[in-house]
Image: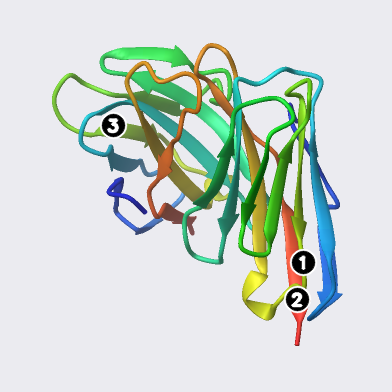
Amino acid sequence: TQLLEQSPQFLSIQEGENLTVYCNSSSVFSSLQWYRQEPGEGPVLLVTVVTGGEVKKLKRLTFQFGDARKDSSLHITAAQPGDTGLYLCAGVLENNDMRFGAGTRLTVKP
Amino acid sequence: NAGVMQNPRHLVRRRGQEARLRCSPMKGHSHVYWYRQLPEEGLKFMVYLQKENIIDESGMPKERFSAEFPKEGPSILRIQQVVRGDSAAYFCASSPLGQNFGNTIYFGEGSWLTVV
């Protein structure tokens, strides 16, 4: 079983639509990170959230860390084909150990 | 990908051979993580190491797999007697010493193992 559950597993939308993907756990994390991975490459860090309730914006991407530091969401406004990729969340436990979710595979069609 | 170097990038092995994957962390980083990714799947944790110590190997298969991070040199992930099911991308990541809160890890570009 995954420590972090990501949903949905797959998402296919049209260019210009909005979307939200979720990352949930029963564990508390000292921080949580979101990565994007393209085929044949390693994951690239998008954001790190540390404080419960924290909201961070990165252009059209909005990241939120749950108040209890157990879950997070990523909202993309007006999605573009360039947003296509595998979105991974990763939680850092108190012992500095990190665990990944299985990812949400996003396809944005032009 | 921020200086984590993995080699080889692509490796082909016949069943029964050994595969050895190397990872040089970013300068100043003494925490190394290995992950495995099967096609169309997310990253699965394998092992977390600090210099000369295995901190958590709960994701490592019990047999044929081993990892080390010596005092000098890169971290090595070794797979003995490879089978077709070992074919995957293996990612290494590193993080700075002692940074718990807001810890950021940086990934290498991966090593793709194909077992034929």
Residue in view at x 56 percent, y 58 percent: A37
Q: Secondary structure at mark 2?
A: strand
User: In which image quadrant can residue B23 be found?
Assistant: top left
Q: Secondary structure at mark 1?
A: loop
Residue mark closest to the camera, 1 vs 2 = 1
Mark 3 and mark 2, same subunit? no
Q: Position of residue B70 (x, y in %)?
A: 21, 21
Instruction: Name the residue carrying label 3.
Output: B75
Q: Chain of mark 1?
A: A
Q: Chain of mark 2?
A: A
Disc number at residue A77? 1
- Are discs 3 and 1 less than 8 Å apart at CB? no
Mark 1 and mark 2, same subunit? yes
The local crowd at label 1, few if under 14, some if 14 to 19, many if 20 or more residues have their Cα within 10 Å, is: some
Q: Position of residue A73 (x, y in %)?
A: 77, 44
Residue in view at x 77 percent, y 73 percent: A78
Q: Quick check: can you spot residue A1?
A: no
Taking the image as shown, residue A99 lies to the left or right of residue B8, namely right
Q: How many angstroms separate mark 3 from mark 2 (CA)?
A: 37 Å
Taking the image as shown, residue A49 lies to the left or right of residue A8, namely left
- In this orientation, which residue lies closer to the viewer: A54 or B84? A54
- In this orientation, which residue lies closer to the viewer: B87 or A4? A4
Amino acid type at image mark 1: Thr
Amino acid type at image mark 3: Ser
